[in-house]
Image (cartoon, helix red, strand yellow):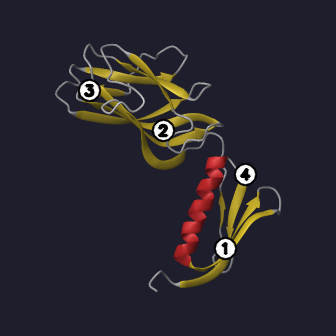
Amino acid sequence: MGDGPVFKGEIRTIQKGTTLSIFRMSFSRMSTSKRICVVLSSLALLLGAMSIVAFGSSAQAKIAAAPASGTVVTVVPQRIADSRTGMSWSTFHALQTQDLQIVGRGGVPLTGVAGAVLNVTAVNPSQDGYLTVWPVGMARTDTSNVNFTRLMSAIANTVIVRLSSDGSVSLFNGSLGQLDVLVDVQGYIPA
């Protein structure tokens, strides 16, 4: 069939710290097993399950599905804000702050999240300036996360930021002009 080499075995999802098998599936092709493993691992991460996915047969491997506190869990990058289209917020005006909910969006779980890895992009700024990102409810820092000039059509930077208790961040436009802002989630840090 051209779907990969023949490979027989099983995938079992086991409750961490026990021998209790939560899910068990047999397979006959390696490529199929890879897809199943990715689905199970992703589901376990999204639900915050404490589980291990084990492969049977000759491919003896174990993958921890529950990340440790303080590690970075990458997700498929997903846009969660785009002021050009009105997604999550409007165009940023001079010296304006807008808040953005992170948890529960873009592959970030609703609970158990301490921080986020974001790609923040300034688009078509009318004046030189900067963007600052910080947790909602805290004092804004004196540092910039994205610096831009009015001659740039777009500039992005990766921002690792702690989240507020409700899972949100604030973004500040440190310019005397307006600009659009995009935010893509790239990962999160478990609490």
Q: Which residue is mark 4?
A: 50
Amino acid bearing label 4: Met
Query: In the image, which disc is placed on residue 60?
Result: 1
Q: Earlier along the polypeptide chain: callout 1 or callout 3?
A: 1
Q: Residues within 10 Å of mark 2 (few under 14, many from 20)?
A: many
Marks 2 and 4 close (CB-CB < 8 Å): no
SS class, disc 3: strand
Q: Relative to residue 111, is residue 12 depicted above or below? A: below
Q: Position of residue 65 (x, y in %)?
A: 65, 55
Query: In the image, which disc is placed on residue 148?
Result: 3
Q: Position of residue 125 (x, y in %)?
A: 23, 25
Marks 3 and 4, Cα distance to the nearest angstrom? 43 Å
Asked where in the image residue 158 lies, by quadrant, the reply is top left
Marks 2 and 4, Cα distance to the nearest angstrom? 23 Å
SS class, disc 4: loop
Amino acid bearing label 3: Phe
Marks 1 and 3, Cα distance to the nearest angstrom? 50 Å
Amino acid bearing label 2: Val
Which residue is most to the left?
Answer: 151
Q: Earlier along the polypeptide chain: callout 2 or callout 1?
A: 1
Residue displayed at 28% across by 34% down: 155
Amino acid bearing label 1: Gln
Nearer the camera: disc 4 or disc 1: 4
Q: Which residue is mark 2?
A: 117
Residue 168 or residue 188, whichever sits in front: 168
